[in-house]
Amino acid sequence: MRDVLSVVNRVLLGLLGLALFAGGLAVTLAALDLAPGAWPWSGSEDVLLSDAERTRWRDESWWWTAVIGGLALVVLLSGWWLVAQLRERRLDEVLVDSGDGVGALLRGRAMEDVVAAEAESLPGIDEARVTLVGRRTQPRIRVGLLLAPHARPDEAVRRLHGEAVEHARVSAGLDVLPTEVRLRSTKHAPERLS
């Protein structure tokens, strides 16, 4: 899905850039009196929109509804596009080198579940949430750990990386598997000392 979004971005940005360049070039040529005679806005008294064109639809009841609705749609689509750019999607599959030149596909959810289960089996880790992101040839792991009250964070992260993440990296045949770990501790009642 990320690759499709990347292609759509390039096409839309290319078309928008081409339209803006063509419009700017047309206005610049007309302003410098370099435009051919049949060129729009080539005369000294020509304007982009005449008074009649600007006020033509003002008295129609549907006009302002259409203008505001169109602008609202542009704002909503722009907001959706921005959110889609900022949000990194979960990786559906990882390409595993099977040695035959073709490769095999490993389900991303399966890899996440295995890393989470192995992480939760480590001492001091109550819960692990694992998300696989990146590209299918260069995946990255994001791990959220909920640590037990007695856990040592440095030990938990070291064992997570040395065991659960390392096993996933080796089994998927990856050279590296970058990992981002976020730690939280379990809330517990304070102990009373007498």
Image (tube, helix red, strand yellow):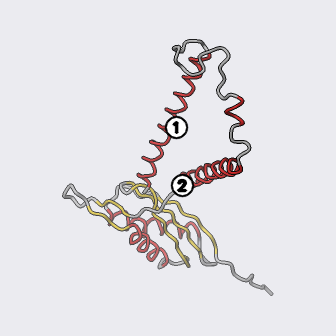
Compare residues 166 and 68 and report the one nearer the observer.
Answer: 68
The N terminus, quarter of image: bottom left
Q: Position of residue 161 (x, y in %)?
A: 46, 65
Q: Is residue 158 above or below residue 188?
A: above
Q: Is residue 134 above or below residue 112?
A: above
Eye-nearest disc, 2 or 1: 1
- Relative to residue 93, is residue 42 drawn left or right? right
Outermost residue on the left side: it is 100
Q: Position of residue 50 (x, y in %)?
A: 68, 28
Q: Is residue 151 above or below residue 26?
A: below
Q: Secondary structure at mark 1?
A: helix
Outermost residue on the bottom side: it is 194
Mark 2, residue position: 84
Mark 1, residue position: 16
Q: Secondary structure at mark 2?
A: helix
Residue type at the position of mark 2: Ala
- Whether pointer 2 and pointer 1 mark residues with C-beta atoms closer than 8 Å, the reply is no
Q: Position of residue 95 (x, y in %)?
A: 32, 59
Q: Residue at x 44, y 56 (%)?
A: 134
Q: Earlier in the sequence, mark 2 or mark 1?
A: 1
Residue type at the position of mark 1: Leu
